[in-house]
Image (spheres, rainbow, N blue to C red):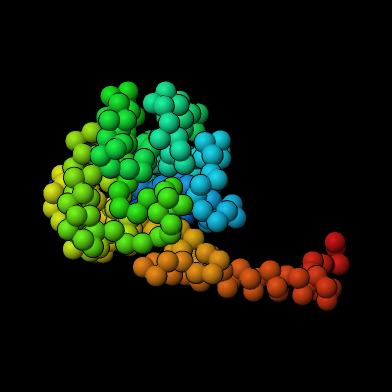
Amino acid sequence: MGRVNTAAIRRMKKEGRKVVCTTAYDAAFAALADGAGVDLILVGDSMGNAVLGFESTIPVTVEMMAHHCAAVVRARPSALVVADVPFAVAGGSFERLLDACAVFMQQSGVDAVKIEGGEDMAPKIAALCAAGIPVMGHIGLLPQRVLQLGGYRRFGKSEVERVQLIADAKAVEAAGAFCIVGEMICHDTAEAISAALNVPLIGIGSGLGCDGQIIVSTDILGLTPGGGPPFAKVYADLGSAASKAFGDYAADVREGRFPVTTPKQ
């Protein structure tokens, strides 16, 4: 099977096929996810929480993103590789945004970028698409605005929010986005958004009515310190397995059981 492209992601909605997405931040995990057949790998600014030890995504910079994007691309995945545009970049000048996206595509080698925001970001999304840069949208909970929000919460409970989210989704689609992430959106509202779109709505904590799902890889693998969000499912408790492996190694070293030697050595 050839490489997944943005047109293929668009077609999946028309064909009634769910889009399978996850995150990766290095070549090793990108290769594992790609080998399992995921359609899209997001190099998310979630790396701030997941692997860099930050309390949020806000400290993640363009330089950090470029470094990790390049590592993922070096795995040569068949999946579409998307780079998150980090905090405050999309909110600044279009020239700065374009420069950052050019770094991700020209130097790191990703296939597309993801931008948080709805109607407010639609003009910049349209300008990026006009410049030949494929864009994945992101509505609902916007982690980069968590300090402004005062915390994490679910969106689309009220009719006002429901109407605004549908408007945001339509604006982002009209601007040229090939798919849209919908994060922490009430399930019935997410279904209404999906019905209003011709491009896939990729859910995270937004229910089964979406056209695909994305979950952070460390949540899937049981590697998130303190556990992942309530909507995530742990498919393998690698955290416990890794902890035991390190403990066994330490005990073998201290007790003289490692390395194992032979007479010839």
Horizontally, residue 84 falls left or right of residue 171, namely right
On the question of residue 102 being in view, the answer is no
Which picture quadrant has residue 206? bottom left
Relative to residue 250, is residue 179 depicted above or below?
above
Give the quadrant of the C terminus: bottom right
Seen from the viewer's position, the closer of residues 219 and 143 is: 143
Horizontally, residue 165 falls left or right of residue 66, namely left
Relative to residue 188, is residue 256 depicted above or below?
below
Which picture quadrant has residue 4? top left
Horizontally, residue 110 falls left or right of residue 258, namely left
* Residue name at image x 46 percent, y 63 percent: 219
* Residue name at image x 31 percent, y 36 percent: 121
Seen from the viewer's position, the closer of residues 202 and 109 is: 202
Q: Where does the image place residue 81, in percent across and percent down from the top left?
A: 40, 42
Q: Where does the image place residue 242, in percent across and percent down from the top left?
A: 61, 68
Q: Count the labels in the image.
A: 0
Q: Where does the image place residue 42, in percent across and percent down from the top left?
A: 41, 47
Give the quadrant of the N terminus: top left
Seen from the viewer's position, the closer of residues 263 and 240 is: 240
* Residue name at image x 36 percent, y 68 percent: 231
* Residue name at image x 22 percent, y 50 percent: 165
On the question of residue 160 being in view, the answer is yes
Q: Where does the image place residue 244, in percent across and percent down from the top left?
A: 64, 74
Which picture quadrant has residue 235? bottom left
Horizontally, residue 139 falls left or right of residue 56, namely left
